[in-house]
Each structure stands twice: as C-alpha cells, then as structure tokens.
Amino acid sequence: MKKKKINLDEMQENKLLKMEQSGYWLIFCGLLAAILIILGG
C-alpha cells in the first residue's frame, strides 16, 4: 500500500507539532507517575 504525502500549511503544521509535543509530555508524566507509584507502594 502506498502512503499518501500529506501537504499541510504552516498553521496546520504548527498545530500538529504542538499536539504531538503535549502528547509526548502527557505520556512521559503518566509513565513517571506509574513508576513512582510502583516504587513507593
């Protein structure tokens, strides 16, 4: 299957980057909290 190249304008690209960044921070904080709960309990 061929992947389509998605063309985004600058505003859409900036919005996508912000969403990705906040998603990574959310996952990071969630994993950190899980580790602290496991080690603390």
Image (tube, grey):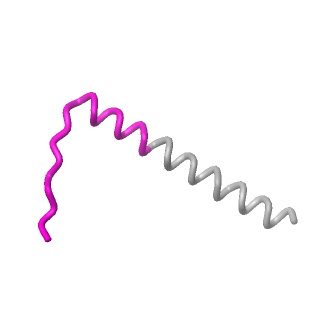
Residue occupying the far front of the picture: 1
Quarter occupied by residue 3: bottom left
- Is residue 37 in the magenta section? no
**Residue at x 81% of width, y 66% of height:** 39
Residue 17 in the figure: left or right of residue 12: right
| The residue stretch that appears in magenta | 1-20
Image coords of residue 29 (percent x, y)? 64, 50
Q: Is residue 20 above or below residue 18?
A: below
Image coords of residue 2 (percent x, y)? 12, 66
Residue 5 in the figure: left or right of residue 22: left
Quarter occupied by residue 16: top left
- Is residue 17 in the magenta section? yes
Which quadrant of the rendered structure holds the C terminus?
A: bottom right
**Residue at x 14% of width, y 52% of height:** 5
Quarter occupied by residue 31: bottom right
**Residue at x 57% of width, y 47% of height:** 26
Numbered circles on residues, count: 0
Which quadrant of the rendered structure holds the N terminus?
A: bottom left
Residue 14 in the figure: left or right of residue 29: left
Image coords of residue 9 (percent x, y)? 19, 32
Image coords of residue 36 (percent x, y)? 77, 59
Residue occupying the far top of the picture: 11
Residue occupying the far right of the picture: 41
Q: Is residue 31 above or below residue 12?
A: below
Residue 18 in the figure: left or right of residue 24: left
**Residue at x 42% of width, y 45% of height:** 20
Q: Is residue 7 above or below residue 32?
A: above
